[in-house]
Image (spheres, rainbow, N blue to C red):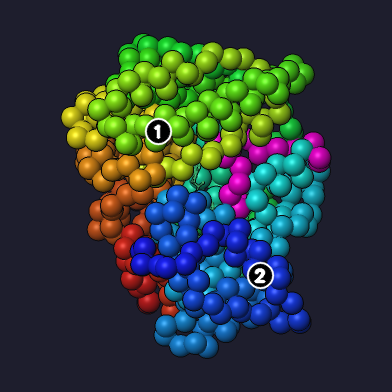
Amino acid sequence: MAQPVRASQSTDQISALLERTPRPGHVPVITTRRAVRNWARNEACVPSGFARPETTGQVVSLVDDARRAGPDGRIKVIGAGHSFTPIAMTNGTLLDLGSMDKVLDVDRGAGRVTVQAGIRLRELNDRLAALGLALPNLGDINVQSLAGAISTATHGTGVHLGNIGTAVVAMEMVTGTGEVIRCSETERPDLLRAARAGLGALGIITEVTLQCVASFNLHAHETIEPLDDVLADFEGFAASADHAELYWMPGSRRCQVKRNSVTDEPRRPQGRLGYVRDKWLGENLGFGAICRVGRRFPSLAPKVARLVMSAAAEREFIDRSDKVFSSPRHVRFVEMEYGVPIADLAAALGEVRELTGRLAFPPLFPIEVRVSAGDDAMLSTGYGRTSAWIAVHQYRGAPHEAYFHAVEEVMDRYGGRPHWGKMHYQTEATLAPRYPEWEAFAAVRAEMDPDGIFSNQYLDRVLGPIHSS
Ligand SMILES: Cc1cc2nc3c(=O)[nH]c(=O)nc-3n(C[C@H](O)[C@H](O)[C@H](O)COP(=O)(O)OP(=O)(O)OC[C@H]3O[C@@H](n4cnc5c(N)ncnc54)[C@H](O)[C@@H]3O)c2cc1C
């Protein structure tokens, strides 16, 4: 939960503080009463201490220290702090695994790579590319830590592709009792299915083995199309490319459609000028300026909507997959994202479309629609069904509560499951019926963290207390 804070710092500033601290044999825990905030700056906490371990052994000793602190001893890892929920917040010890970013093992024949869990996705993508490998799918930014992205079931788009956790074939974790445990498809497969979307509730992930694919290029084709045409056959649209998605600005009849498909053709990237115009000026600087106007003068918002859509250009290029998947995001916003069964997308989005017209303060950001394949991770938002994702955003500082509550009511009617790292108002009572293996996850959690040292207020709300047997 957000706490009132006077001084605050981003995760990068914490990293800088830890860098300046001499590291003797043991891992120093720095105690300051400084606050930490997430990327969106809508959540903050004041940890009792910070530490930056470099090895699994050091993580074990930090967990042991937290346990010795007694019933109030808590410990959590923060990745890049890119969750919009307080999932990574704690008033116990906060770990930064930024130094645990090494590639540990490569099985070229099997396409499997084992890395330390603190590696950032951008770094991982570059290391994999140098090995001729890639992840099959990614979200739209690349700055998250690998373990953070796995823990919240971060996803991209692609009707035949699951979230990032589906590429995980083995993990090493430190439990709440300080044990080092490995799980894989053959060793504790139940634990692997829980940890592929573990919410940071099961243990500290220290190593991850990923099933990669051969590196590939994507042919990106972006067009502007009438929203009604796309929704008339949404499943056909979702299948029209390996990675299909759309952005729709409430108030507009048209949407920006992105179709990215695997190609054998060589790279033909966007020119430097075009990239700066579209990604920096269009999607960041110019868009930020438009949002500021809309926040100050809400009555201009419909015009803002038209301007945003008219600024979206048609374009086509070919580039290395991870370069196509991710874009820089410098305009800060808050976000809620729900997964619904793909067959319900058109109806659910139709209701959202209708409610946006009634809001006292209009949305200044487009709605993003993506798709993903089902999987079997116990608390994966994509568990057991092909999902369509509806993501609603609001410019930072503009009113979002009425909008997000109204959208959530719609999602509830369609059995929607909220992204664990994005804003929502659900609790254990409302979430449990949406996950067939809820109890199985609770049992794994009780075994891995019997004393709740990885808990925080968010986990207490969404998972409830730990049920010790
Ligand atoms: C601009 C922006 C764009 C985004 N785009 C997408 C997108 O395209 N698709 C999507 O699905 N999501 C997206 N997200 C959400 C984001 O991917 C998730 O919130 C993700 O969890 C953030 O990773 P992180 O490293 O910042 O983790 P944090 O937010 O720092 O932490 C998330 C959770 O992981 C836990 N954790 C971190 N490291 C470990 C570890 N080593 N062991 C155990 N637990 C750990 C934390 O304790 C916490 O519980 C976006 C967010 C932003 C701000």
Q: Main secondary structure of the magenta part?
A: loop
* Labels 1, 2: front one: 1
Please check the rendered image and state whether residue 137 is part of the magenta-colored stretch, yes or no: yes
Q: Quadrant of residue 59?
A: bottom right
Q: Which residues are magenta?
A: 130-147
Is the residue marked by circle 2 packed among few (<14), some (14-19), or many (20+) residues within 10 Å?
Answer: some
Q: Tell whether 151 sits left or right of 210.
A: left
Please check the rendered image and state whether residue 374 is part of the magenta-colored stretch, yes or no: no
Q: Tell whether 153 sits left or right of 234.
A: right
Three-letter amino acid code at the position of disc 2:
Leu
- 34 relative to 245, above or below: below
Q: Which is more toward the observer, 463 or 41? A: 41
Q: Quadrant of the N terminus?
A: bottom left
Residue 456's tag is none
Name the residue beneath numbered marker 1. 291
Name the residue beneath numbered marker 2. 18
Q: Quadrant of the C terminus?
A: bottom left
- 355 relative to 208, above or below: above
Which of the two discs, 1 and 2, labels the residue nearer the N terminus? Answer: 2
Q: Tell whether 444 sits left or right of 324.
A: left
At horizontal 32% and vertical 42% (from top left) the residue drawn is 398
Where residue 57 sits in the image (x, y, percent)? 70, 75
| Element assignment for label 1 | helix
